[in-house]
Image (spheres, grey):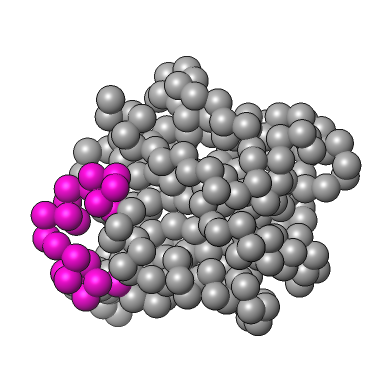
């Protein structure tokens, strides 16, 4: 089944002691909340705030910015476009890069002469990179943010991952839903601590957040979003 092969649902993603230390950082560190406490997971926030807590720094190094980790996930998800070229080629084309706050513009940059006529295009450099955000979802998350309903991530996004630091018992709504393009639900996943949902963002990558309607303990739905992207559109079949 192409749809379900497209998603990995991994309970106990991190060793428990490592998870507990990381949870303490993202749960308690006020610096990481910032604008995201509005309920949005925002581009670039934790990067511009200069991550200096040890566990999150270590997690980013070992997972998000580690091309060998990403290549293993690529193989597990059967992303043929990359696997056929091999690990060495992928690693060579992976870079440490900060995605602009406005996101990646997938179109080439147009060049104009003094009269405003197009004289050529600047070819966009092509490489893979990762993005990391810590998300704090409040009531209403999943409506106007958190993807804003049924969607596939942008064409540049190769893989999306969500590692949770909350439990479904702490709120009403907020489940992760694997869906179809017609909005029908394939699987609804309750949020669990140390659950990681990983997915290829191809034509089978439809998903959404069941809107979060109530925080029972006035505590947000917390997760680390980490993704693999390419500076130009990756998927040709969408």
Q: Residue at x 31, y 41 (%)?
A: 202
Q: Residue at x 88, y 42 (%)?
A: 217
Q: Is residue 231 on the magenta stretch?
A: no
In terms of depth relative to the viewer, which is nearer, 173 or 113?
173
Which quadrant of the rendered structure holds the N terminus? Answer: top left
Which quadrant of the rendered structure holds the C terminus? Answer: top left
Q: Which residues are magenta?
A: 74-94
Q: Is residue 78 on the magenta stretch?
A: yes
Relative to 209, is 122 above or below? below
Q: How far from the left and from the top, in percent, is residue 191?
A: 64, 38
In terms of depth relative to the viewer, which is nearer, 76 or 107?
76
Residue 88 is left or right of residue 74, and the answer is: left
Q: Residue at x 49, y 24 (%)?
A: 187
Relative to 233, is 33 above or below? below
In terms of depth relative to the viewer, which is nearer, 192 or 49?
192
Relative to 108, is 13 above or below? above
In terms of depth relative to the viewer, which is nearer, 133 or 231?
133
- In the image as oriented, which residue stretches furthest toward the left? 84
Q: How far from the left and from the top, in percent, is residue 122?
A: 24, 73
Residue 105 can be seen in this image: no
Residue 7 picture quarter = top left
Q: How far from the left and from the top, in percent, is residue 176?
A: 57, 34
SS assignment for the magenta stretch, majority: helix
Residue 54 picture quarter = bottom right
- State how many labels appear: 0
Q: Residue at x 45, y 71 (%)?
A: 62
Q: How far from the left and from the top, in percent, is residue 84?
A: 11, 54
Residue 6 can be seen in this image: yes
């Amino acid at each position: 089944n192409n749809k379900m092969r497209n998603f990995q649902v991994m309970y106990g993603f991190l060793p428990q002691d490592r998870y507990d230390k990381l949870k303490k950082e993202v749960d308690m560190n006020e610096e990481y909340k910032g604008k995201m406490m509005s309920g949005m997971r925002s581009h670039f926030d934790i990067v511009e705030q200069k991550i200096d807590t040890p566990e999150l720094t270590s997690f980013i190094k070992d997972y998000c910015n580690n091309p060998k980790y990403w290549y293993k996930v690529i193989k597990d998800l059967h992303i043929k476009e990359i696997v056929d070229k091999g690990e060495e080629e992928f690693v060579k084309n992976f870079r440490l890069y900060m995605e602009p706050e406005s996101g990646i513009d997938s179109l080439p940059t147009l060049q104009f002469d003094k009269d405003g006529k197009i004289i050529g295009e600047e070819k966009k450099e092509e490489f893979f990179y990762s993005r990391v955000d810590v998300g704090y979802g409040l009531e209403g998350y999943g409506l106007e943010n958190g993807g804003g309903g049924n969607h596939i991530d942008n064409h540049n996004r190769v893989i999306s991952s969500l590692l949770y630091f909350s439990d479904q018992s702490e709120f009403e709504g907020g489940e992760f839903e694997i869906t179809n393009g017609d909005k029908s639900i394939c699987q609804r996943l309750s949020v669990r601590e140390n659950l990681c949902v990983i997915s290829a963002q191809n034509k089978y990558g439809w998903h959404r957040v069941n809107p979060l309607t109530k925080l029972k303990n006035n505590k947000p739905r917390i997760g680390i979003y980490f993704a693999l992207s390419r500076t130009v559109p990756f998927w040709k079949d969408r």
